[in-house]
Amino acid sequence: MKSGSFERTIVISMVIVLIAVFFFSIYTFILNNEIKSTNSWVSHTNRVLYRSEKVISALKDIETGTRGYILTGDSVFLQPYFSSRDSIYDDIADLKDLTKDNNFQHKKVSSLDTLTTKRLALCRNLQLLKNNNTSFDSIKPLLLQGKKVMDEIRDTFKSIQQEEERLLTIRKKNSDDVERKSQFGFFILFGSLLFLFLTAFFAIRFLSGLRKKEGKALRNLDSGILFFSKRIDEIIKGISDPFFALNKRFEFVYYNDSVIKSIGQGKGNLTRKNVFEVFPQYNQNIIGQKMKDVMATQQSESFEAFEDFLDQWQDITIYPTSQGISVHIKDATKRKTYEAELNTAKQLLETINTVALVGGWNVDIASGKVSWTDITRGIYEAAPDHVPDLRKLINFYKPGKSRETIAQFINDAIEEDKEWDAELLIVTDAGKEKWVYSKGKPEFQDGVCVRIVGTLQDIDAKKKLSEQLLKSEQQFKSAFDNSLDGMTLVGVDSQIREINQSFCDISGYSRDEFKQLGFTAFTHPDDREKDKATFEKIMSGAIKRWRYEKRYLHKNGNIIWAEASGSVITDREGNIESFVAQMQDITNKKNAEDKFLTERNLLRTIIDNLPVNIYMKDLESRKTLVNKAELLFCGAASEAEVIGKTDQEFYPNKYALQSIAEDKYVFATGKPLLNKETKAAKHDGTETTILTSKIPLFNENNEIIGLVGISYDITFKEQ
């Protein structure tokens, strides 16, 4: 071949290749724009779903907190209402902005805004009615109306989320189509390279360098894909709770380390194993059923369940995915244990309250109207249709010193903000004189007394028998609620690179403020050394993941208790590049634990110092709690000598069997045994006459789990 023909052949070949590359570049440019567009819409849909989940979660917190406040009167339940009341409208505004491109969704969000305003107004009205001691029957219509509005909100959210799930499916399909186009583009590239290779047959030295450059580019592409996959895997593994994904055949396709450490110990490698074969108990329990439901309906489910083989309560969330489902499990045992203990403590307090005959009352100063409990009505022996007011309340006290004293107490409370407690004589509606222990406390607003609240206790028997029975009531309440965790990406220089909205919501700082101040300014000074020590371990390679409790400082100066966890992110060479950190707000749990311990110690102190015998028994009549008076009666030096034993181990068989027979009656009928006068014997054999009350204890399922007993020694009264 002549030199000119050879050169023309090379030139023509190169022109053809360049034309192919040119068109492929145009095709790649168009493809990249399509990828950006589809990814943008998928991200947009996920943001709508995230915001909607956040709003419905806040509304559930508000609804639960309001219901708890209505039932208990404990203002700690209103914390979710006040913390979510303002931010929820910001979230709805974000939803409106996100759905303005979709008229159907935008109308649904506007309807949600109206319903939310209506629901918050109902919550506020319920709080005002509860603050005014309105009866439950009067509040009930508003509760039902609130439930109806909440059901409308849930239906609206369901409609919004179903539409977004439909759009997400379409957009993911578009993404898959773009991916197939990219594969077609790869074939074009391959054809161009093949043609280039044929041309290189005539210009091997020229094209050799080009092939090396292409090979290097492909190696860099593979390395980048591997690095990106590794980073995603490290972030998912940083989730502190068990998390796993199943395909449509219910086979494990992914699970993090927490699955092996908690629910999957001893199960080996779970990949491609069927979840119902690995965990056969799921075939019979609600967890497995919910997995099947979500797989079939493609609708998310959140619920709690008790896992027998772990002896653990769990909060479980199941999400549908394009490949199957994802499952997130959170240990809820501690929360359920606290709820059970608080329920038992409440029953014990209510039982003591009833036996000790302590009633409550309050006076509205502006109207003079009085409201009281049934026990208070009973102490006054007032008729059911008796309508009390302040004048009538004062006139119940015996003319003379008692009436003058109570009138002076009420006047001093209104004028000088003074509390009182005193033993006074009343004359009941039946004409009977009776000693009572009266307590009152004024409540002021803007320097004016608006209400007086108090208690009334029938101490007539104690006065005549020269005994003193102290009564105190404490309610133990604590609410634990799941909240979205804060997450942040931090560089090795401790500078914040990215931070999510939950972190900002919990801390009160904006993203810009975080990036300017850094993490150290947000951390409590006393915990900075702990962070420093953890950072040194991470940088030395001693640990790659961590979890511990620490304190943060809210922007307003308040301390936030949190469970901090996270994991490292490495570069291609395995060097630490940054950290992904999580922060779960556990401030309420910490405060609740402190409150629970304080109130439990207070309750025990009260019980131990009451001058009556108080004890608790299980269903086998074994004692599980005794106060000091009961210890003295048994002749025991410590509680350890009594716990787990029956009356037969302390008293003559005759009296012990009689007491056990009373226990069995209470267990069998579920009815209390009140003020029964019986013969008994002390540990030294001395026979006494006691007045005994035994009241059944129920668990949250209304099952009898034991009883509480209270007895008075009335021997000298008979004499």
Image (tube, helix red, strand yellow):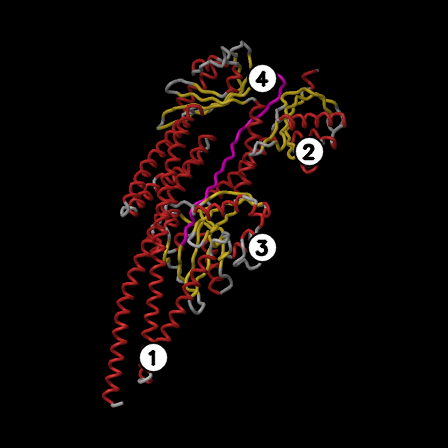
**Which residue is rendered at x = 26% and y = 75% of the image?**
18
**N-terminal-most mark, 3 or 2:** 3
Closer to viewer: mark 1 or mark 4: 1
Closer to viewer: mark 2 or mark 4: 2
Closer to viewer: mark 1 or mark 2: 1
Residue range corresponding to the magenta coloring:
464-487
Residue to which mark 4 is pinned: 460
Element at label 4: helix
Element at label 3: loop
In the image, residue 243 lies at what x, y percent?
A: 49, 53
**N-terminal-most mark, 1 or 2:** 1
Amino acid type of the residue tagged 1 in the rendering: Phe
- What's the mark number on residue 620? 2
Amino acid type of the residue tagged 4 in the rendering: Asp
Residue to which mark 3 is pinned: 265
Amino acid type of the residue tagged 3 in the rendering: Gln
Q: Nearer the viewer, residue 576 or 257?
A: 257
Closer to viewer: mark 3 or mark 1: 1
Residue to which mark 1 is pinned: 197
